[in-house]
Amino acid sequence: MASGKMTGVHFALIIFVMLTLISGVIAFMMYKHSSEMQADLDTAKAELRSQGEAATKARADTDALQKFVLPNAMEEVGRPGSPPTTTIGFASQEANRLAGPSAQPTLIGILAKMREQLDNLQRELDETKRSNVKWIADFQALEQKYKKVADEHDNSRIAAEDQRDNINKEKEETVASLQAELQREQQKNINLQEEYEKYREDKTAQVSELDNQISKLTETNGVLTRELNDMRDASFDIPDGQIVRVDYGSMRVWVNLGRDDNLKPGTTFSVYQKDLATVGGSISDIKASIQITRVDQTKPHLSEASITSEGAYPGDFSRPIAKGDAVFSPLWRSGVQEIFAFAGKFDIDGDGKDDSPLLITMVRNAGGDVQAQVTAEGERVGDEITSKFKYFVEANIGDPSKTPDPAEQDQIKKIHAHVNEMKKEALQSGVRVITMNDFLSFMGYRPQRRLW
């Protein structure tokens, strides 16, 4: 019984055997694992040596590439897009800067693009060389042509210079001859000047004497003209027509002037006694005024007129208009244009304003004309007064002592100077000088303002 039981020895032996077996298994496994690890280590060392060799080779290649790309290699190679402090970044920046429009993403692309442009430029250069060869040939041909022309011009110039020398020689001879002739003519001129001076002195004395005579004659003429004007009844004008019919009921008359006499409606006449030989002399001879209202187109010498005034004053019927009375207007004459000269401010209706334009229009409508005038502004216009003028009519020319305005005084003085000059011309030409009121009376004009 005792031999069949498990004792502590047995357990110890079993445990020892099991531990021995476990230790063996563990030792075997550890040996196997150690062998595998040693193999892996050997393999890793071999790979490491291979990678080290590859890295050493790559580093050498990188250094060689850096030296090829840049003169001074940088510490970092970098990648595309790296800053310019790396080899690739600096190379990319410089490639873009140097390539300009040919810039490409890669260095090979840049070189290829630049090569393409270089080939194009080379082709253009070859074409330019071929063109230059043609141009040089054309230039040489033109050079030969123009050299020939230049030679011809040189020959022509030489011939022209020879001809010029001959002409200059002839010219010098001609000039010498002309100078000699000029000296002779100058001497003649001196002699003529001496004769002229003597002649001028003689004629100056004669002119001075004639001026004195003219001055005396002008003064005499002026005195006689003033005396003639003072007489007021001295006139050489004859009637223009006659009154042929009178109708006091309608205040109308008819005159023997009309269509064939070129009479126009609106023309005014002064009326005189039928037994007067001349008219246009004294204002007292005027007995009435009429204005033509209608020219009879069926009869050559008949017109109708209205009586605008009668008698020396309103209500004076001591000298009524009668058949056969003479009519006269200084503005109108059958077949003749009467010419007048005006001077001053023509206030014909008493409103204080200058009516020169209105009066000139009336003169021209009647067939006359005003061809010389001194305006109210002091300007003289028109012609010199000659014998063609019938009257020189003088209106209000002002008084410089009655205005304090210096500008207006100068204007009035200018008017006076022009009027005196025109009076002198009128006296020398025998032209009668009359006042505005006498002129209006002679022409038969009665201002409406005064009639009202």
Image (cartoon, rainbow, N blue to C red):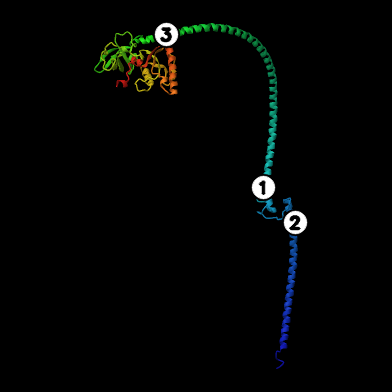
Residue for point 72% across, 77% down: 26
Give how far across and how far down residue 208 sits, in percent: 50, 8
Amino acid type at image mark 1: Arg
Which circle, 1 or 2, is nearer the viewer? 1
Q: Is residue 49 left or right of residue 363?
A: right
- Give the quadrant of residue 324: top left
Q: Give the vertical position of 387 relative to 45 (above or below).
A: above
Residue on which disc 2 sits: 60
Residue for point 67% across, 42% down: 120
User: In the rendered image, which quarter contains the C terminus?
Assistant: top left
Give how far across and how far down residue 186 sits, in percent: 62, 9
Residue for point 42% across, 8% down: 221
The first of marks 2 and 3 along the sequence is: 2
Check residue 106 in the rendering and tell me which mark sits there, or answer none: none
Residue 150 visible to an observer of this rendering: yes
- Give the quadrant of residue 127: top right
The first of marks 1 and 3 along the sequence is: 1
Amino acid type at image mark 2: Ala
The first of marks 1 and 2 along the sequence is: 2
Residue furthest to the bottom in view is 1
Residue 258 visible to an observer of this rendering: no
Residue on which disc 1 sits: 97
Q: CA distance from mark 2 to mark 3?
A: 139 Å
Q: Secondary structure at mark 3?
A: helix
Check residue 221 in the rendering and tell me which mark sits there, or answer none: 3
Q: Give the vertical position of 322 relative to 154 (above or below).
A: above
Q: CA distance from mark 1 to mark 3?
A: 111 Å
Amino acid type at image mark 3: Asn
